[in-house]
Image (tube, grey):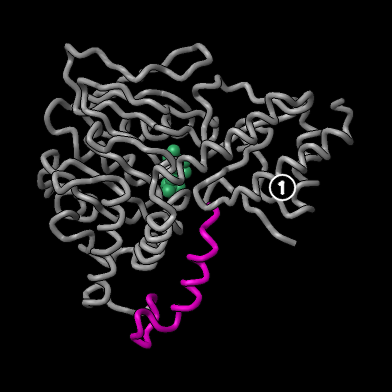
Amino acid sequence: MTVYNFSAGPGVLPATVLDQIQTEMKSFNGSQMSILEISHRSKQYEEMELEAEKDFRDLMNIDDSYAVLFLHGGGTLQFTNIALNLTDKYHHVAYVDSGHWAQKAMEAAQKIDGLQVDRIGSSDNNLPKISAPDDDPLDYLHITTNNTIEGTTYHQIPNSTQPLVADMSSNIMAQPYDVNQFDLIYAGAQKNIGPAGMAVVIVKRDRLTSHPELSEIMDYWLEDQKHSALNTPPVFCIYAAGLVFKWLKKFGGVPAIYQQNLEQAKLLYDYVDNSKLFNNSVAKDERSLTNLVFGTGNKQLDQQFIADAADKGLVNLAGHRLVGGMRASLYNAMPTAGVKALINQMKQFEMNHGGF
Ligand SMILES: *Cc1c(COP(=O)(O)O)cnc(C)c1O
């Protein structure tokens, strides 16, 4: 049975990347040593890291005015690190409250002494606007481009007079964003980049200054000086991410995968919109390409659908416990055959449960 993994994270990886990891596992680059065994001070490691970084820069069009960091601690540690590293000037930041992860990011900033944290939100059903008053300078305005749990996305980023910081954990490289619109972008790796255990940080170098009061591994400036290898870096994650970057380049880069992501999302959303049983309440222009939420509105039926689908090899379709229903995460590595198999299963289920 073919298994399609719709997990929101850690998410599906390209099969060819997993094959390559397996082939090279005992001898990285002909060294007779595993990538799990080589020193992070070795030439082999340094070459591998530089190449991963170069491919990532190519994919995202990142020039040298930005640092690219591969760091421990996932997305969550960066919630705190950005608030510690980028707030020297005004001690004032704002967070667009677009969902669960945006709130988590904001709460981390609120724990920092002497930092004023404004919340930008609204009570209506649409995503809050990305804007903050421009008469009151901020160290940054924080946004979450894709709300992993709620299945919503900011597809367009407006020009902002305030410096933007973005959590792109769940849609980095799934659709094109212009890095130059942001002072900092960060993403936990385990959704669209590689294995868990790492975050990628892209930050404007002119925003970085030394922070001797911080633990060294939380100091972005120092991490940039040390090429993310101040202490032992997440070697395997960087290696596996590097293979994913090569896979994506071969695929045609972000523009090509974006086309595929658009097509896949359209297949599923069109089906849901025409279904009498399944629905999705997200405004059409805010619907996520990577985390597609839907449900029947009936908890028991949802459970049944999830169980039936799992029996057919369509796994990890349960929505987040906070919202219930179903969630299909269609990260870059999800083949279109998986989306089609899911839609067939939904059709079957709808026929069996009186949707017609
Ligand atoms: C998953 C996720 C996080 C948390 O990432 P960790 O690497 O588990 O800390 C943060 N933000 C968003 C948008 C996410 O989807």
Q: Identify the residue shown where x is 65% and y is 50%.
A: 337
Classify the position of the C terminus by image quarter.
Answer: top right
From the viewer's perspective, is residue 65 above or below residue 272? below
Q: Position of residue 174 (x, y in %)?
A: 44, 42
Q: In the figure, residue 71 lies in which quadrant?
A: bottom left
> Left or right: 299 with respect to 333?
right
Q: Position of residue 213 (x, y in %)?
A: 14, 47
| Neighbours of disc 1 within 10 Å: few (<14), some (14-19), many (20+) | some
Give the number of marks.
1
Residues 121 and 157: in front is 157
Q: Quadrant of ligand 1?
A: top left
Question: Mark 1: which secondary structure?
Answer: helix
Q: Position of residue 115 (x, y in %)?
A: 23, 28
> Left or right: 59 with respect to 92?
right
Q: Residue furthest bottom?
A: 32
Residues 88 and 337: in front is 337
Residues 19 and 317: in front is 19
Residue under label 1, please give it: 341
> Left or right: 238 with respect to 204?
right
Image: magenta residue range? 10-36
From the viewer's perspective, is residue 95 above or below residue 49? above
Q: In the figure, residue 255 lies in which quadrant?
A: top left
From the viewer's perspective, is residue 31 above or below residue 325? below
Based on the picture, tell me whether residue 17 belongs to the magenta stretch.
Answer: yes
Residue type at tag 1: Ala
Q: Position of residue 246 (x, y in %)?
A: 38, 61
Q: Identify the residue shown where x is 29% and y is 56%.
A: 70
